[in-house]
Image (cartoon, coloured by chain):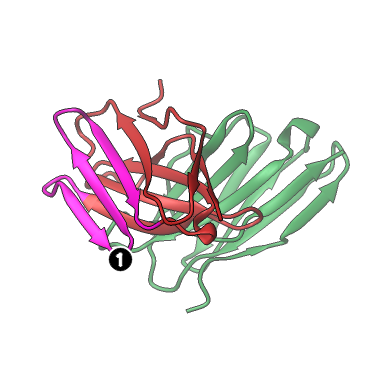
Amino acid sequence: DQQVKQNSPSLSVQEGRISILNCDYTNSMFDYFLWYKKYPAEGPTFLISISSIKDKNEDGRFTVFLNKSAKHLSLHIVPSQPGDSAVYFCAASVYNQGGKLIFGQGTELSVKP
Amino acid sequence: DAGVIQSPRHEVTEMGQEVTLRCKPISGHNSLFWYRQTMMRGLELLIYFNNNVPIDDSGMPEDRFSAKMPNASFSTLKIQPSEPRDSAVYFCASSSPLRDTQYFGPGTRLTVL
C-alpha cells in the first residue's frame, strides 16, 4: 500500500519555464510534507517543506502547494534551470511518530537548455 | 557541521561474506534512519532509532540484516551472509528532536557478486 505516490516517473522542461512536480497521498493523518532533490551518486538533499496548517510555502524559485482536501501537493520551480535536473522525492510524516518519513517513488526532472 | 557521514562509499564483496556499513549522524540529532534504494523498490526505510533505541525494524528484509546504535554518534548496518540481491545503495539519515526533516548521508553503494 503506497501511501505517497508520484505518478510521473519523469518530466522534461525547457530552461526558463516552470516545472511542476506532483505528489498524492492517501493517509489523512499526514501533517508534514517535504521535498527532496537527489543527484546521481549523492544522498537526497532537503529542499522545502510545508506543514498541514499552511497551503503554500515559498523559498526562492521553489514553492510547495498543499491541497488537503484533494490530498495533493505540488512543487513549482520557476524559472527552471539546467542545474535543477535531478530526481525529486516527496515525503510525508505524522507528527510525534518518531520522525518517520514515507517517500514517494520519485520524479526525474530534466531541464533542457 | 560535516553532515551525515557514511563509510565505506563503495563496497564490493562476494556472496556469503559479512558486510558492515557505518554511519555517523549529525551532532545533536536524536533520530537515525537506515534506507535502501533499488530500481525496483525505490527508497525504502529499513530501520530507525530514537535516542539510540530501535523503534521500528519492520523494513528489515530478513534476519540476515541487523542494525545497532551503541551511542548517539555511531550506527552500523550489518548483512551476514550477504547475497547478490542485497546489491543496492544504502543511505543513513538523521533528524533533530525539533522537526521531522531528515538529512541524508552520501550513501554506500554495495555490490555483492
The image position of residue B19, as x and y in percent, is 76, 48
Chain A in the picture: what colour?
A: red
Q: Is residue B110 above or below residue B8?
A: above
Left or right: where A47 falls relative to B65: left
- Magenta segment, which residues? A51-79
Work out whether residue A15 or residue B78 is closer to the camera in this orientation and state it.
Answer: A15
- Quarter occupied by the N terminus of chain A: top left
Q: Residue furthest left?
A: A53
Q: Residue at coordinates 11% horizontally, 48% vertically from top-left?
A: A53
Q: Is residue B101 visible?
A: no
The image position of residue B85, as x and y in percent, is 74, 31
Disc 1 is attached to a residue of which chain? A
* Disc 1 target residue: A60
Q: Residue at coordinates 51% horizontally, 33% vertically from top-left?
A: B59
The image position of residue A28, as x and y in percent, is 20, 30
- Quarter occupied by the C terminus of chain A: bottom right
Assess whether residue A52 is covered by the magenta stretch. Answer: yes
The image position of residue A60, as x and y in percent, is 30, 66
Residue type, mark 1 in image: Gly
Work out whether residue B40 or residue B79 is closer to the camera in this orientation and state it.
Answer: B40
Q: Residue at coordinates 39% horizontally, 43% vertically from top-left?
A: A90
Q: Residue at coordinates 24% horizontally, 59% vertically from top-left?
A: A58
Q: Is residue B3 visible?
A: yes
Chain B in the picture: what colour?
A: green
Dot 1 crowding, Cα within 10 Å, few <14, some 14–19, many 20+: few
For numbered disc 1, what is the local secondary structure?
loop
Assess whether residue A6 is covered by the magenta stretch. Answer: no
